Amino acid sequence: MGWIIAIIVGGVAGWLASMVMNRDASMGIIWNVIVGCVGSLIGNALAGPLFGVQGTVQAFSLTGLLIALVGAIVLLGIVNLIQRGRVR
């Protein structure tokens, strides 16, 4: 059951991050889920040591969603820096 919630919350976080970073047209639902789940890992890696906050997407919580959103925005920012010279 935790994996299903992680996919749903990861998809929502990835979709919101793609809207914030203006990449929604170039991403599909699968990439939104991947970005959200990887963003959750990045967010937990950053938020844990810096702020002492832990959140998970396997059991839905607002904290977990916000951490996944921030991590997904960081991930998409890194992708934008890498792809800056390329035509999207």
Image: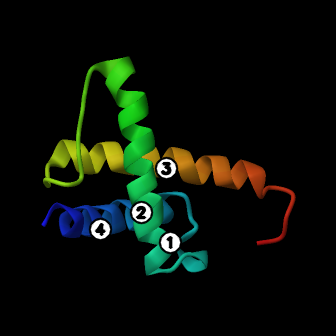
Mark 1 near mark 2, Cβ–Cβ under 8 Å? yes
Mark 3–mark 1 Cα distance, whole angstroms, equals 13 Å
Name the amino acid type tagged 4: Ile
Give the SS element for disc 2: helix
Mark 4–mark 3 Cα distance, whole angstroms, equals 17 Å
Mark found first going from the N terminus, 3 or 2 = 2
Q: Residue at x 37, y 19 (%)?
A: 49
Name the amino acid type tagged 3: Ile
Residue linked to disc 1 = 31
Please give the label number shown on residue 73: 3
Give the SS element for disc 1: helix
Give the SS element for disc 3: helix
Residue 26 percent location from the top left of the image? 61, 77
Please give the label number shown on residue 14: 2
Q: Quadrant of the N terminus?
A: bottom left
> Local crowd at mark 1 within 10 Å, few (<14), some, or many (≥20)?
some
Residue 16 percent location from the top left of the image? 39, 62
Q: Relative to 41, does residue 27 appear above or below in the rendering?
A: below
Name the amino acid type tagged 2: Gly
Mark 3–mark 2 Cα distance, whole angstroms, equals 8 Å
Residue 73 percent location from the top left of the image? 49, 50
Please give the label number shown on residue 7: 4
Mark found first going from the N terminus, 4 or 1 = 4
Q: Quadrant of the C terminus?
A: bottom right
Report the mark closest to the observer, 3 or 1.
Answer: 1
Residue 61 percent location from the top left of the image? 14, 49
Q: For this view, does 60 lie left or right of residue 64? A: left
> Local crowd at mark 4 within 10 Å, few (<14), some, or many (≥20)?
some
Mark found first going from the N terminus, 4 or 3 = 4
